[in-house]
Amino acid sequence: MTELPAIKILAIYKFVDQPDFESLKAPLAEFCCGRGIRGTLLVAPEGINGTVAGTPGAIDELVGWLSDGNVFGGRFGGAEIKYSFADSQPFYRMKVRLKPEIVTLRAPEANPGRQVGTYVDPEDWNDLIDQDDVVVIDTRNDYEVALGTFRKAQDPHTSSFTEFKDYVASELDPQKHKKVAMFCTGGIRCEKASSYMLAQGFEEVFHLKGGILNYLEKVPQDKSLWDGECFVFDERVSVRHGLEIGDAQLCRACRQPLTPADREREAFIEGVQCHHCAGEENASKRAAAAERQRQIELAAARGEAHIGADVRKAAEERRLANTARREADRARNRKG
């Protein structure tokens, strides 16, 4: 019998109007801290969003409480939920933060709790975006798109989600672009973007349910229209089909994701800088990163773990194991 990993990771979000959102901070923090759950939950007038991790029992108890607990009155029932697993706790502390929005767009007319586009399951996504009259839009940031995206997808070249409004105003026309299909990492940004698009007068707006991660998990690679890897906001950095850990790594100075080719560039110095941040204007960041890297190396020499090093080591070990397995599969296929 296969032993399950010790830690269960929950990614959750739901758009729902909740004027009493401030009253939820204390009970959420108390419940999670009392069960050893760590991570971050954002609570806002428009809903809840976050990623937390704990023992499987603790996470299951949290999900049940969010769905059925009296304090919430059933408001989080039917939330978009994604699970993954890890051998060790990926977070250092538990945080519940009150925010104006659970995903920042700064467009009051965008309210998925009241108006949202048409959800498209991963199994139906290919048929939709293959249509000639459908405009496919990647609602993620430019550094995410650089690692991978869907074929035919437009890149808005935004550095933050708030810039999506400018892209719509300058590049899209509800009279010309009758069908629009959007996607993002886990579904939350494209869901809010769909609400914004409807408010701007676009009639047929679609978005990928559960986002790219749901697609990569459910659609076989030989039927996929996805090219590259998907950036994720944790120490895995990127994933590919089957949610296997990808080859990207973060620059520890500027936090940009780097491909293996990026790490071969002359400007790259492990833990210090990459081609994105090698300019003189980033000297202070590079100095801080260099000192951090020095502390990591000193800790390693003493046989100690620098904070965060265990998480990165575990991710790197999984990445190497996946690479070895893929190479073994290719070798077997060549023999066959």
Image (cartoon, helix red, strand yellow):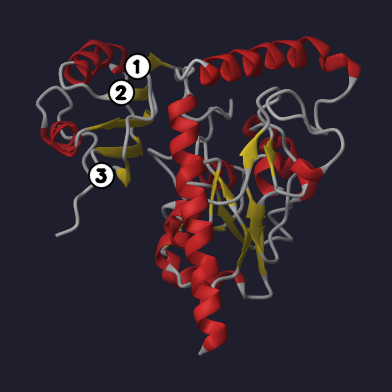
| Crowding near the residue tagged with mark 3, few <14, some 14–19, many ≥20 C-alpha atoms within 10 Å | few
Check whether the beta carbons of the residues at disc 1 and disc 3 lie within 8 A of each other: no
Question: Can residue 151 be seen at all in this image of the molecule?
Answer: yes
Q: Which three-letter amino acid code belongs to the residue tagged 3?
A: Pro
Q: Quadrant of residue 227?
A: bottom right
> What residue sits 51% from the left and 42% below the top?
316
> What residue sits 26% from the left and 39% below the top?
8
Q: Is residue 262 left or right of residue 321?
A: right
Q: Nearer the viewer, residue 47 or 26?
A: 26
Residue annotated with mark 2: 38
Q: Nearer the viewer, residue 68 or 180?
A: 68
Instruction: Please give the label number shown on residue 139.
Output: none
For residue 21, above or below residue 3: above
**Sequence order check, earlier mark of 1 and 3:** 3
Residue positioned most to the bottom: 336
For residue 201, above or below residue 287: below
Q: Is residue 53 left or right of residue 316?
A: left
Question: Can residue 207 be seen at all in this image of the molecule?
Answer: no
Q: Is residue 316 left or right of residue 283?
A: left
Residue annotated with mark 1: 93
> What residue sits 71% from the left and 58% below the top?
175
Q: Quadrant of residue 121?
A: bottom left
Q: Which three-letter amino acid code belongs to the residue tagged 1?
A: Arg
Q: How far is mark 3 from mark 2, CA to CA?
A: 16 Å
Q: Which three-letter amino acid code belongs to the residue tagged 2?
A: Arg
Residue annotated with mark 3: 5
Check whether the beta carbons of the residues at disc 1 and disc 2 lie within 8 A of each other: yes
Q: How far is mark 1 from mark 2, CA to CA?
A: 5 Å
